[in-house]
Image (cartoon, rainbow, N blue to C red):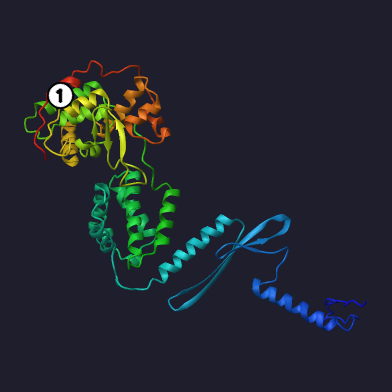
Amino acid sequence: MSADIIVFPGPRNARGLETQTHASSCDTEARAKHRKTVRTAQVQDGRRRKNGKSRSVEPNIQEIPGENGKASFRVQLRKSARGKTLNLTKTFSTLPMARKWKKRKLAEIEIGSIQTVERSGATVAEAINARLAIHKNLGRSAKQQLSWLKDSKFGKTKLSDLSLDALTNLADDMLAEERQAQTVAGYLTILVHTLDWASRRGFSVPVPALKEAMEQMWEDEILARSEERNRRPTIDELNRILDAVSSNKRQKSPLAKIIVFAIFSCRRLAEICSLRWDDLNIEQKKILVRDMKHPRKKKGNNVWCNLTDEALEIILSMPRTSEYIFPFKATSVGTAWRRHRDRLNICDLRFHDLRHEGITRLFEMGIPAAFVAKHSGHKNGGCLYRYEHVEQQGDKFMTWEWTKRVLNEPTGPAT
């Protein structure tokens, strides 16, 4: 029984030619087959493989094995820009560095190759107007921020001119106007979301460049997260505000009732002004809070919340003149609160601090976090940790005169 003898290419001589090696009659066919296999592999890989095989870790990035088990990462980009084909290649020692370079180069290519499609020379203001015209149910803060950006000098910027420098300059200008870093972060976040939305509706926007700009500003701490507040009103501050409200005969809304209710119900102002009679369960001392604030779920987050005895008593003192228990505009109530607060020179006290006070009060009364969450509406008990900095034990509002006095305050006409 005969067997084919396969002879692989022999060593090369000084002229680069293979030396002849004795082989069987099948050598020629085997050698040709081997060379074809090698050439096919080289074409597929685009280069000669060394020290093992490379592999694709994600689009446009290949992992290349090296010595001592260390790998490098090669980025290969082939893109068309302004009628020309660009071939970019660079190798990095780590995958994060390769990803960052790839992302930056794709953004630069997109900026340099923006083609005017349907809206030639469109500006930031036009993109914002398009969203405001469609999304009429945006929150008050989002509308206010987008309107300011639209009417500012930045609003005249062409979408094709947007870049890292453009967003950084906008952030610097806003910070120069004494806005807080967390406030600027809110403006830029809604701006980039809006421009991303516009890019999917015919506007030519360099979205990757804008998102990279945001990441870099977070890294450089140009932007910052909102700071947690621990401000609590004192009984004296509350008495002064409520006395001023009660003596103001021109006050249309029952501001005193709403202030005291905010403490005992642990509710936000917008939630208070949207509570409905139909959602009240007197027997179980509960009320349905519609569209409760949520970091991701903006609509339909309806939560049943427990009512303290004081909060329920205030609700029952209101006349049923509307489907709403407190049929007043939250913006008007907030303006009235700030007006009285400022006239009394009470510094750094916000209406939202009343909710904080109400939740902390429950902890000071010794109520477990699981039951406090049933009043506050928190679904994640961990979110309550910042309210647990109790300063005393017991209920400091137990003998507060306004708990009962507010029940007899005028309710005022709806606004």
Give x and y (percent) for residue 405.
15, 21
**Looking at the rendering, which quadrant does residue 170 occupy?**
bottom left
Numbered disc total:
1
**Looking at the rendering, which quadrant does residue 26 occupy?**
bottom right
Please state which amino acid type lies under the numbered disc 1.
Answer: Leu
Q: Which of the image's four quarters has the N terminus?
A: bottom right
The residue positioned 26% from the left and 48% from the top of the image is 139
Give x and y (percent) for residue 67.
72, 58
The residue positioned 9% from the left and 29% from the top of the image is 248
Quickly name the residue at label 1. Answer: 407
Q: Nearer the viewer, residue 254 or 171?
A: 254
Q: Is residue 76 visible?
A: yes
Q: Nearer the viewer, residue 6 or 96?
A: 6
Q: Nearer the viewer, residue 41 or 325?
A: 325
The secondary structure type at the circle numbered 1 is: helix
The residue positioned 37% from the left and 55% from the top of the image is 168
Q: Nearer the viewer, residue 115 or 281?
A: 281
Q: Is residue 346 visible?
A: no
Give x and y (percent) for residue 156.
26, 63
Give x and y (percent) for residue 128.
27, 59
Task: Answer left or right for 285 relative to 16.
Answer: left
Q: Residue furthest left?
A: 249
Task: Answer left or right for 329 relative to 155.
Answer: left
Q: Which of the image's four quarters has the C terminus?
A: top left
Task: Answer left or right for 289 relative to 32.
Answer: left
Q: Residue furthest top?
A: 399
Q: Residues within 10 Å of mark 1 (few under 14, many from 20)?
A: some
Q: Residue furthest front?
A: 283
Task: Answer left or right for 65 relative to 236.
Answer: right
